[in-house]
Image (tube, rainbow, N blue to C red):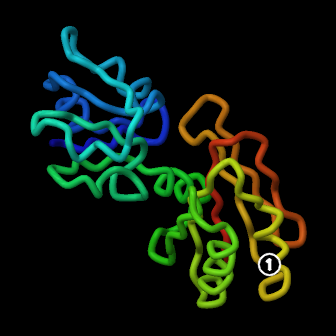
């Protein structure tokens, strides 16, 4: 099985990813991942939208599984097989903010305990790190800001939405005056930057 990162938005496929998709005969992916790869899927290739993530390990060895962003950043890289990296939302967010990745630490709040993610983020910022927080639509940036006001009141917070898409939006504020997401596809960067 090949796990292929299709980037976090349109036009972010690498040449290796394009070649792998073009040679595929069986593809699985989320609706968004399939849309990102659609221009390179060959005629006659069987394409299936993933409906049961629990059964992905049962796919045939020749399957190509599309993962949004990079498969190793909270993606489908855990499935094993050959992993072909993609351009992650972390790479794009840090590029848009002109931040080096060398101070970065990842906190995953997508489908996870949001309170624990907020506490982990505050602790990492206290260590001088810049946190890349993978959010889900229910994640409250205001709760993160409230927690950071206590320990790091001048901390900067960026909400990066729809990265790579025409409606991309990057809003930067502080713990005292945080940006608020307007959509449901966003990540957060927080720290001393």
Residue 116, image x and y in percent? 64, 76
- Asked whether residue 135 appears in the rendered view, the answer is yes
Residue 161, image x and y in percent? 66, 44
Name the secondary structure under disc 1.
helix
Report the front residue among 138 and 92: 138
Determine whether, in the image, residue 86 is placed left or right of residue 125. left
Q: Give the quadrant of residue 5.
A: top left
Q: What residue lies at 81% left-to-right and 56% top-to-bottom?
A: 179
Query: Does 8 appear above or below 127?
Result: above
- Asked whether residue 192 appears in the rendered view, the answer is no
Query: Does 145 appear above or below 20?
Result: below
Residue 79, image x and y in percent? 25, 53
Report how many numbered discs are placed on residues in the image.
Answer: 1
Q: What residue lies at 50% left-to-right and 74% top-to-bottom?
A: 105
Q: Which residue is mark 1?
A: 147
Determine whether, in the image, residue 74 is placed left or right of residue 124. left
**Which residue, as the protein is rendered here, is positioned at the far left?**
61
Q: What residue lies at 79% left-to-right and 88% top-to-bottom?
A: 151
Residue 142, image x and y in percent? 83, 63
Q: Quadrant of the C terminus?
A: bottom right
Q: Quadrant of the N terminus?
A: top left
Report the front residue among 113 and 67: 113
Q: Give the quadrant of residue 172.
A: bottom right
Q: Residues within 10 Å of mark 1 (few under 14, many from 20)?
A: some
Q: What residue lies at 62% left-to-right and 68% top-to-bottom?
A: 113
């Amino acid at each position: 099985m090949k796990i292929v990162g299709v980037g976090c938005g349109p036009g972010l496929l690498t040449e290796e990813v394009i070649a792998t998709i073009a040679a595929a005969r069986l593809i699985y992916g989320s609706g968004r991942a399939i849309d990102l790869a659609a221009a390179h899927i060959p005629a006659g290739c069987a394409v299936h939208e993933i409906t049961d993530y629990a059964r992905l390990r049962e796919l045939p060895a020749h399957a190509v599984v599309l993962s949004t962003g990079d498969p190793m950043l909270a993606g489908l890289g855990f499935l094993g097989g050959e992993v072909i990296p993609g351009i992650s939302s972390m790479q794009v967010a840090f590029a848009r903010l002109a931040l080096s990745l060398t101070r970065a630490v990842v906190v995953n709040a997508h489908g996870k305990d949001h309170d624990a993610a907020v506490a982990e983020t505050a602790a990492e910022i206290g260590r001088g790190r810049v946190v890349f927080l993978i959010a889900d639509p229910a994640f409250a940036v205001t709760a993160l800001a409230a927690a950071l006001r206590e320990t790091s009141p001048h901390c900067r917070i960026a909400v990066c939405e729809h990265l790579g898409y025409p409606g991309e939006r990057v809003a930067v504020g502080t713990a005292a005056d945080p940006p608020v997401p307007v959509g449901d596809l966003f990540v957060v960067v927080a720290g001393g930057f």
